[in-house]
Image (tube, helix red, strand yellow):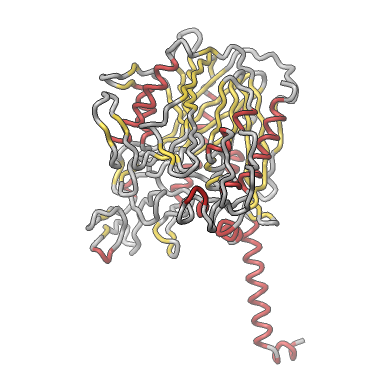
Amino acid sequence: MTQFLGKHKILTAITLLVLLLFIFAAYRMKGPYRSYHIDFVLPQQNTTAPGVLEVGVAMRKITPDLTQYDSWTDADNDAHYNPRKGDSYQDRNSNGRFDAVWLAGFSNNRPAKGVHDDLWVRSIALRNNGVTLVMTTIDSIGIFHEKFIRVRKMLDPTLHIDHAMFSSIHDHEAPDTMGIWSYSPFRPLFDHQYMEQVIQACKESTEEAVRNLQPAEMICAEVKIDPKGLVKDTRAPQCFDRSLCAMWFRNPTTQATIATLVSWGNHPEALGSRNSLITADFVHYLRQGLEDGVPDPNGIEGFGGMCLYFQGSLGGLMTPLHLEVPHRDGVGVFKDDSFQKAQALGENVAILVGKALRSDAAWKNENPRLRVAAKTIYAPMAGLYKYAIMLGLIHPGYYWGGKARTEVNAFRIGDVEILTCPGELYPEIAEGKAEAPPGNDFNLSAPLEVPGLRQVMKGKMNLVINLANDEIGYIIPKSQWDTKPPFTYGRDSAPYGEENSGGFDVAPTYHREALALLERLHQNN
């Protein structure tokens, strides 16, 4: 054997190299929590009396402390660090590296200069008929599934939390929590310490919300919005999440507000790509308006308590960019990216919600029996996403056949239903308006994702929460997939979207699994 190895040194070296690469690839492909899988409906039978709904809220600040990072000077004021153009930084710890808070969204290499408003993790716990559910919303661009699995495993078992759902608002002015925007793809500087801060905040906020449970009554309202001045659809067909859904939880004895909850679909990116200040964008002003009120003219009285915003269907792309947003006074208009525009958008939505919750159209959820369904699913990936997952670069955990593990949830709170989506859903799939235009890459004559998800939900008010428990990118109807000519809707080139999607089979898979979970939620209910 020794003689063989000696005579074939090159072959031996190549064999060992291939073996080492195989071991490395297998390790990277495995991903954390490999055996984690959930599949349940609670309660299995509605034998427990509904009783009184209990609600608790909590929050944790996740604004990075910029004094712990290097400050920098932007010579050409383009929001991107480029020393060749005269940009410089103060190396506070003398390590020879630019340690910055890298803002997510738009493009990489966008360091933060300061903080405009704080970022938060906000949780609401609900308990009734023997079931405890916690829903958490995070001021982040998105967080991968394995991080939330870790949070669940960290939760105090004595609190008897049956399920914890986590959702990101998809903030484009918050630190990178996905490892995509941190300086350069060839020199990644992802901030693992900040990610640990977010994970710990999710744990603490979830647990405290349960510890704060108290009796509550639940007032609901839904506004069918006119998108003009609120949101723009940048890709045909024009389809919006027109359902601005709101809930008001208050103490039945004192009538003091515990929380308000809002869900609607729009990208928090009114500040645009040249902003260098940390902010929750229009969501900050929306929450502030409902908690503290919006001043005159045409303002509303605040509700107090805590406001939680959960992102709705925003693929497509639902955005305030290049949109004229009116001031609440009915005179001013903001089109350019700015804090004034973000404030106008947030306050206008807060006013719509505030008026709806105090109107005759608002209704009390009289029998808020709680039911929770959750299931691990495996979404087929394609293109760059598939290979990035294989190499463990993003969304670690590769499953044979090119699949990524993710999750779907469905909740019922009396006459309200909530369905979650692990990415950015094109509203066509939720609203039943998917099309099969000529020129689609698969020559489909009809959409696959039918019926629309909201059409099979059975609540008096139905929410579809995006970026829930994961972020697997845009979820595009397969019949609208368009990367090759001839292009759909008379375009001269491929539309934006597919390059940030996990692939053409993600939408049919999610739609099929969501319908199946909703059917189970509705059984024996």
Q: Position of residue 123 (x, y in %)?
A: 50, 30
Left or right: residue 300 versus residue 375 is left
Task: Decide if residue 202 is in sight here.
Answer: no
Left or right: residue 87 versus residue 513 is left
Q: Tell me the quarter of the picture where residue 114 sits.
A: top left
Residue at x 66% of width, y 77% of height = 16
Residue at x 59% of width, y 44% of height = 436
User: Which quarter of the rendered picture does the N terminus lie within?
Assistant: bottom right
Residue at x 42% of width, y 54% of height = 181
Exactly how many numbered labels are in the figure? 0
Q: Tell me the quarter of the picture where residue 174 sits.
A: top left
**Which one is nearer the viewer's eye here, 287 or 199?**
287
Spot the residue most to the right: 1
User: Which quarter of the rendered picture does the C terminus lie within?
Assistant: top right
421 is higher (above) or lower (below) than 111: above
Q: Position of residue 138 (x, y in %)?
A: 47, 37
